[in-house]
Image: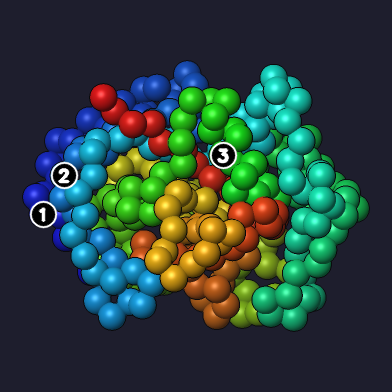
């Protein structure tokens, strides 16, 4: 799988975690950033059609420790008056238990304030959950306002792996997933799945972080990334890491290798994002 062309010193990981624990005590998690050093990294996997194993070179960057929350997105909307694609087009796709596998409902009332539709309640008590039911274009507009950007496909993968050369940042054992990620625990989507305490999204930083101190790199919500695969057109964008909907029997994108595809204007209730800042 992935090997750094140089090893990440344990001191680097320790300093990042100490910095995170100190700053996070006084700031929202999604405003705390972890520094990733520049270098050559091996990403992808042998035989993977969309993400073959290769060496990439990246400059140093900083990545938010969590996904952007409803609270932060609300500040953006309040400051700018921005109207999301779901609010304009009334075409958001949401989920409720009982639907056939890979089936979603179009809900004209769903948007970031009502990510699963108005009948299922709003975000008043979920301001520390990741913002969802937004499109790639919505995420870009937030980034412009906040003076940040989306991670590239390679940056996201490097950050998610946190020095691991395995499919998952803790190794190859999928059974450890429930400690690190909010996913769908049931065998199928016919009935509710609350084994981990959450039917849909969970508050950010509720599960264990990876070695870089980054939370929810897998599960909770798919995270938009910049960049395109050569086989895709201009209207296709990418998201990584899986979501609360993904299970061991369906979707299964909660890893550091797979790359999801979605229309740039589509708004799903399991899509969100985290952000990065370039270091000078």
Earlier-in-chain disc, 2 versus 3 = 2
Q: What residue is rendered at 81% in x and 44% in y?
A: 87
Picture quarter containing residue 13? top left
Where is residue 167 shown, x and y percent of the image?
32, 68
Query: How far across and how far down the image is residue 78, in percent?
Result: 73, 22
Quick check: marks 1 and 2 in contact, CB under 8 Å? yes
Judged from this view, the residue extending furthest toward the right is 119
Q: Earlier in the sequence, mark 1 or mark 2?
A: 1
Residue that numbered label 3 is attached to = 140
Question: Is label 2 or label 3 in front?
Answer: 3
Q: Secondary structure at mark 2?
A: strand
Vertically, is 204 above or below 245? Answer: above
- Disc 1 versus disc 2: distance between alpha carbons? 8 Å
* Residue count near mark 3 (Cα–Cα under 10 Å), binned few <14, some 14–19, many ≥20: some
Task: Name the disc covering residue 5, or none.
Answer: 1
Which mark lies nearer to you, 3 or 1?
Answer: 3
Q: Is residue 103 above or below residue 68?
A: below
Q: 273 left or right of 200?
A: left
Q: Dividing the image into 4 quarters, which one contains the N terminus?
A: bottom left
Query: In the displayed structure, would residue 221 be above or below residue 52?
Result: above
Separation (CA) of disc 3 from disc 1: 32 Å
Mark 3 or mark 1: which comes first in sequence?
A: 1
Counting other residues with Cα less than 10 Å from the Cα at mark 1, is it few (<14), some (14-19), or many (20 or more)? few
Q: Is residue 35 visible?
A: yes
């Amino acid at each position: 799988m992935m090997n750094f062309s140089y090893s990440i010193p344990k001191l680097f990981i320790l300093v990042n975690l100490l910095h995170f624990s100190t700053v996070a005590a006084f700031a929202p998690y999604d405003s705390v950033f972890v520094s990733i050093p520049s270098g050559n990294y091996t990403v992808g996997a042998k035989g993977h059609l969309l993400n073959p194993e290769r060496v990439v070179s990246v400059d140093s960057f900083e990545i938010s420790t969590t996904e952007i929350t409803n609270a932060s997105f609300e500040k953006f909307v309040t400051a700018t008056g921005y109207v999301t694609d779901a609010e304009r087009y009334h075409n958001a796709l949401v989920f409720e238990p009982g639907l056939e596998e890979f089936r979603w409902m179009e809900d004209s009332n769903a948007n970031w304030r009502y990510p699963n539709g108005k009948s299922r309640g709003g975000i008043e008590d979920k301001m520390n959950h990741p913002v969802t039911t937004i499109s790639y274009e919505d995420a870009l507009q937030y980034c412009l306002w906040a003076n940040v950007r989306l991670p590239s496909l390679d940056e996201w993968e490097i950050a998610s792996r946190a020095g691991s050369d395995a499919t998952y940042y803790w190794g190859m054992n999928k059974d450890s997933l429930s400690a690190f990620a909010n996913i769908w625990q049931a065998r199928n989507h016919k009935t509710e799945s609350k084994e981990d305490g959450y039917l849909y999204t969970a508050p950010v930083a509720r599960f264990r972080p990876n070695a870089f101190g980054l939370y929810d790199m897998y599960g909770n919500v798919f995270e938009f990334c910049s960049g395109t695969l050569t086989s895709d057109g201009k209207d296709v964008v990418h998201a990584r890491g899986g979501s609360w909907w993904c299970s061991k029997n369906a979707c299964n994108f909660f890893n550091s290798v797979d790359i999801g595809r979605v229309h740039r204007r589509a708004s799903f209730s399991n899509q969100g994002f985290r952000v990065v800042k370039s270091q000078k």
